[in-house]
Amino acid sequence: MSGTGLLRAGRGGGDGRGEHGNLAGRSPSAANRHMGRTARNESIKLRAAFFNNIAVGAVVTGMIVPCVAVWRLMLQGPVNQTELYGLGLLLFLVYAVTLVGRSEADRALSKLED
């Protein structure tokens, strides 16, 4: 065996690691490719969860709370028609925000890799 062969055999440390010191003799870029995909998938999931949480928060704060408030006002007496129009506009805007949040979450999830 030549001197170069001895050095090469000793690089892996005798524990089954390849020339670059990683398992299965893969190059560092090939070994990190899988972890890079996993990290990208986790980032995509976090982005989807963020937009989904915005959609849920919009429903709770922008739809349920105002409807309960108007319902309580209706129990106390007649409600001004302007307030009802305002509530309708608010519900429409919140519904639009909810749709955008859900579509962004779905778009993010469609980019997941196997």
Image (cartoon, rainbow, N blue to C red):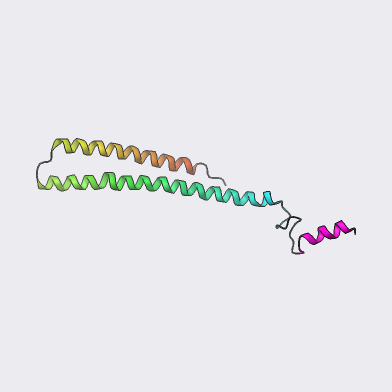
Quick check: is 24 in the magenta stretch?
Answer: no
Percent of width and height locating residue 105: 44, 43
Q: Position of 32 compared to 15: left or right? A: left
Q: Is residue 7 above or below residue 58?
A: below
Residue lying furthest left in this view? Answer: 77
Quadrant placement of the N terminus: bottom right
When asked about the image quadrant of residue 7, the answer is bottom right
Count of labels shown? Answer: 0
Percent of width and height locating residue 76: 10, 47
Q: Residue at x 35, y 47 (%)?
A: 56
Percent of width and height locating residue 51: 41, 45
When asked about the image quadrant of residue 89, the answer is top left
Q: Residue at x 51, y 48 (%)?
A: 43
Q: Residue at x 33, y 48 (%)?
A: 57
The magenta region covers: 1-16
Percent of width and height locating residue 11: 78, 60
Q: Position of 52 compared to 74: left or right? A: right
Q: Residue at x 53, y 45 (%)?
A: 112
Residue lying furthest right in this view? Answer: 1
When asked about the image quadrant of residue 21, the answer is bottom right
Q: Is residue 40 above or below residue 10?
A: above
Quick check: is 9 in the magenta stretch?
Answer: yes
Q: Position of 26 compared to 45: left or right? A: right
